[in-house]
Image (tube, rainbow, N blue to C red):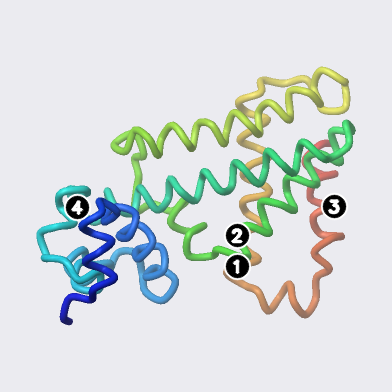
Amino acid sequence: MPNSPAATHRYHHGNLREVLIDSAAQAIVSQAAEELSLRALARAAGVSQTAPYRHFSDRNELLSAVSERGYIQLIDRLTATIAIASDDPEHQVKAAAQCYIGFAIENPSLFKLMFGPLLQPTNQFPTLHEKIRACNKLVQSMLAQGVQSGSIIREDLRYLTNTAWAGIHGLATLVIDMPEVFERHIDMERQIEISVRTLLT
C-alpha cells in the first residue's frame, strides 16, 4: 500500500503511537486480537514496517495500550454514573451494573480484550495494571459505602468486590456472547435488578 499523505503527515508530527492504537482498536472489531499484525498496521498508516517498534516492542504491548484506553473510558463512565446515582447503595450498584453492561454491549471486542487471557498477567504492562487496580478500587469504594450504611453485609471488601464484579461481569459476558437469548426472552432492566438484589443479599 503506498504511503498516504495524511498518514505520513500524522507520523511526522509524532502521532504514530496514537494512530496505531486507533487502528488496532478498529482492527480487533473485525478480527481476533491474536491475529493483529504490527506490519499490517504500519502499511495502513503509510510508514515503514519497523516504525511501530519505536513505540511498541510487540503486538501485545500495543494491545495493552488499547486495553488501557478501554479501562480509562470505563472508569470515566462508571465514575460519572455513580456520581449522579442516589445515595442508596442498591441504586448505585444497579446504575454501575447498567453502565458496565452497556459498555460491554457497545464495545464487545474491546471488552473481551480488557478482561481476556491474552494480556495476562497484566503486571507485565504496568500502566494497564494500574488502570485495572483503579477500576477495582472504584467498585470497592462504592461497596464500602454500602457496608458502612448497613445496606450491604459486613465482609472483607476484597471478597465483596470480587463477588460483585464476577456477578455483573458474568452477566455482561452472557449478553455479548449469547445476545439472541437476551433479545428474545429476557428484559435486561429486570435481569439487572434481580442480579443486583441477589448480590446484595
Which callout, 2 or 1, points at the residue further toward the start of the chain?
A: 2
Give the residue pinned by disc 3. 194
Say which residue appears at 61% left-offset and 65% top-offset: 106
- Asked if the residue under mark 1 is in contact with the one under mark 4, i.e. CB atoms within 8 Å, the reply is no
Question: SS at mark 4?
Answer: loop
CB contact under 8 Å: marks 2 and 1:
yes
Give amino acid for label 1: Ile
Which residue corresponds to mark 2?
104
Residue 173 on image: x %, y %: 59, 60
Q: How far apart are marks 4 and 1 (CA)?
A: 28 Å
Q: Which mark is residue 58?
A: 4
Comes first in the chain, label 2 or label 4: 4
- Using the numbered discs, state the Cα–Cα distance from disc 3 to disc 2 in whole angstroms: 19 Å
Question: Which residue is depicted at the point 41% across and 35% down?
Answer: 129
Local crowd size for mark 2, using a 10 Å CA cut-off: few (<14), some (14–19), many (≥20): many
Could you tell me which residue is drawn at 15 percent across and 49 percent down? 54
Residue under circle 1? 176
Whole-Å distance between the Cαs marked 3 and 4?
Answer: 43 Å
Amino acid found under the numbered disc labelled 3:
Ile
Element type where label 1 sits in the image: helix
